[in-house]
Amino acid sequence: MPKIEIYTSHTCGYCHAAKRLLDKKGAAYEEINVAFAPDRRPEMVERAGGRRTAPQIFIDGKHVGGCDDLYELDFEGGLDSLLAS
């Protein structure tokens, strides 16, 4: 399984939706809640190329994007291949 990191906030509906999709796929992930660890937010923004909103999702170090990007990747058939690698 690839290493999946997802930067979240506990009050974010998009974060919950992204985690639901990953859970549905059976993918294990490391959740970094920037609301509880605000010192990690600058790291998220830098890694995400300036994006400041949660969630920000990384698979094997590659920035996938946010929730909409993750669902689009799944719709286009690319998520399963990333998860299988």
Image (cartoon, rainbow, N blue to C red):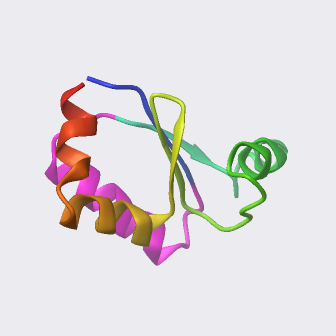
Query: Is residue 83 toward the left or the right of residue 64 in the image?
Result: left
Q: Residue at x 77, y 52 (%)?
A: 45
Quadrant containing the C terminus in the rendered view? top left
In front of the other: 25 or 73: 73
Q: Is residue 79 above or below residue 30?
A: below
In front of the other: 60 or 77: 77
Q: Position of residue 11 (x, y in %)?
A: 55, 72
Q: Residue at x 74, y 45 (%)?
A: 37
Q: Residue 59 sits in which quadrant?
A: top left
Res. 20 visible in picture: yes
Query: Is residue 81 toward the left or the right of residue 19 in the image?
Result: left
Q: Which residues are magenta?
A: 8-28
Query: Is residue 49 toward the left or the right of residue 72 in the image?
Result: right
Q: Position of residue 15 (x, y in %)?
A: 46, 65
Res. 27 visible in picture: no
The single residue placed furthest to the bottom in the displayed view is 13
Q: Is residue 30 above or below residue 64?
A: above
Query: How many tags in the picture?
Result: 0
Q: Position of residue 13 (x, y in %)?
A: 45, 76
Q: Is residue 33 above or below residue 17?
A: above
Q: Residue at x 53, y 73 (%)?
A: 12
Q: Residue at x 26, y 23 (%)?
A: 1
Q: Is residue 24 magenta?
A: yes
Q: Is residue 62 magenta?
A: no
